[in-house]
Image (spheres, rainbow, N blue to C red):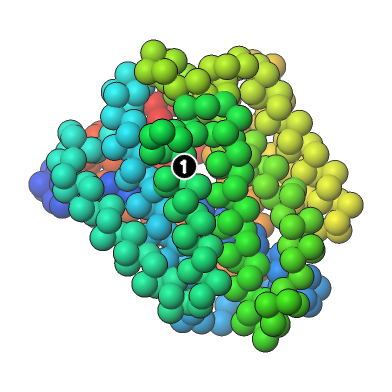
């Protein structure tokens, strides 16, 4: 009965009302949440070894996630506005200019950004600083001219790595603050060292995400890493980063980064050998899922949020575009 209800054509009349929500690209919230939770997990393990199943609800943690999510969403809107030409060439399911008018998209972006900062202010001044830095690197420097780092191979990778570090740091600092540690006792050196394996995995995935867009990036003047250095070099570098993450995670006695890296590494090997777009997409999606799955054992409240976004997105993309997305059954169509 549920399946019959979900297949009812009436949903196609309803899903256009979700266009403004999906302008924020909720499926990209997964890596955002994963990196913040990774920072929280590493922080709590640094303070008190191997705590798991921390399911107590905390309003300030919720405010942190909402604020970071909204600010990330605002940067994703900016990215879509700036990428309208290349997205058209890449045949992406872009909403700006097609389903949502560009002026409305700009208004939503500004409103989302302001709301994000309000929620971070509730969470604490350090969270507010992290949010400002996130928007600086991921929103402004990455997308806006004259910087436009996303169109430059090394600066684009650097911007994504900095965004990953900021997300991770936001999680670490939040836990350290909630445990009553002072600013000087946050464990800044430990935070940076333990973040490196996660940042290597995050940067590896970020590199792979630029591969499916190569056909549209080069004609529009975007010299991304794979456009500059080639497909195999990009995959090889990403795989090397994951292998280095495993070694460093092992050296730091961090079970989460070590386990996720070694479980993800075979997907990079297959992608390098077969050199096919579908294998690159598998490496991206499974790498995120594996790390998220491990983090669920520490912060299980992440799971309901992921499931809601996952199935709401499947509902939206199926009834709006006749597309099964998100999915682990990888095909050649990507958002």
Residue 119 visible = yes
Q: Is residue 198 left or right of residue 95?
A: right
Of the 4 image quadrants, the one containing the C terminus is top left
Q: Residues within 10 Å of mark 1 (few under 14, many from 20)?
A: some
The residue positioned farthest toward the front in the image shown: 146
Residue 69 picture location, percent across and down: 42, 59
Residue 275 visible = no
Residue 147 picture location, percent across and down: 45, 35
The residue positioned farthest toward the right in the image shown: 251
**Which of the 4 quarters of the picture holds residue 272?**
top right
The residue that appears at 86% across and 58% down in the rendered structure is: 253
Residue 189 picture location, percent across and down: 79, 63
The residue that appears at 58% across and 65% down in the rendered structure is: 170
Q: Is residue 27 left or right of residue 245?
A: left
Figure label count = 1
Of the 4 image quadrants, the one containing the N terminus is bottom left
- The residue labelled by disc 1 is 141
The residue that appears at 79% across and 56% down in the rendered structure is: 193
Which structural element holds mark 1?
helix
The residue that appears at 67% across and 86% down in the rendered structure is: 180
Q: Is residue 289 above or below residue 205?
A: below
Q: Is residue 147 left or right of residue 40?
A: left
**Which of the 4 quarters of the picture holds residue 324?**
top left
């Amino acid at each position: 009965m549920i399946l019959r209800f979900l297949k009812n054509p009436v949903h196609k009349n309803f899903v256009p009302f979700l266009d403004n929500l999906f302008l924020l690209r909720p499926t990209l919230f997964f890596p955002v949440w994963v990196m913040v939770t990774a920072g929280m997990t590493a922080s709590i393990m640094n303070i008190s070894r191997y705590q798991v199943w921390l399911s107590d609800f905390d309003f300030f943690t919720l405010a942190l996630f909402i604020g970071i999510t909204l600010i990330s969403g605002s940067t994703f809107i900016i990215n879509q506005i700036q990428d309208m030409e290349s997205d058209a060439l890449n045949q992406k399911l872009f909403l700006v200019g097609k389903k949502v008018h560009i002026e409305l998209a700009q208004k939503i972006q500004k409103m989302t950004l302001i709301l994000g900062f309000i929620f971070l202010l509730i969470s604490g001044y350090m969270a507010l600083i992290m949010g400002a830095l996130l928007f600086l690197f991921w929103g402004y420097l990455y997308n806006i001219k004259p910087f436009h780092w996303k169109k430059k191979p090394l600066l684009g990778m650097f911007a994504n790595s900095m965004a990953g570090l900021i997300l991770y740091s936001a999680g670490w600092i939040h836990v350290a603050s909630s445990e009553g540690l002072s600013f000087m006792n946050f464990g800044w050196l430990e935070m940076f060292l333990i973040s490196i394996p996660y940042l290597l995995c995050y940067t590896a995935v970020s590199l792979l995400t630029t591969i499916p867009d190569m056909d549209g990036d080069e004609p529009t003047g975007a010299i991304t890493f794979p456009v500059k250095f080639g497909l195999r070099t990009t995959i090889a570098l990403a795989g090397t980063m994951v292998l280095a993450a495993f070694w460093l995670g092992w050296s730091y006695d961090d079970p989460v980064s070590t386990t996720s890296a070694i479980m993800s590494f075979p997907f990079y090997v297959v992608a390098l050998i077969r050199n096919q777009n579908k294998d690159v997409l598998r490496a991206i999606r499974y790498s995120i899922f594996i790390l998220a799955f491990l983090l669920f054992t520490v912060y299980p409240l992440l799971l309901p949020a992921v499931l809601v976004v996952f199935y709401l997105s499947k509902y939206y993309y199926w009834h709006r575009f006749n597309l099964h997305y998100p999915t682990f059954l990888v095909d050649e169509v990507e958002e």
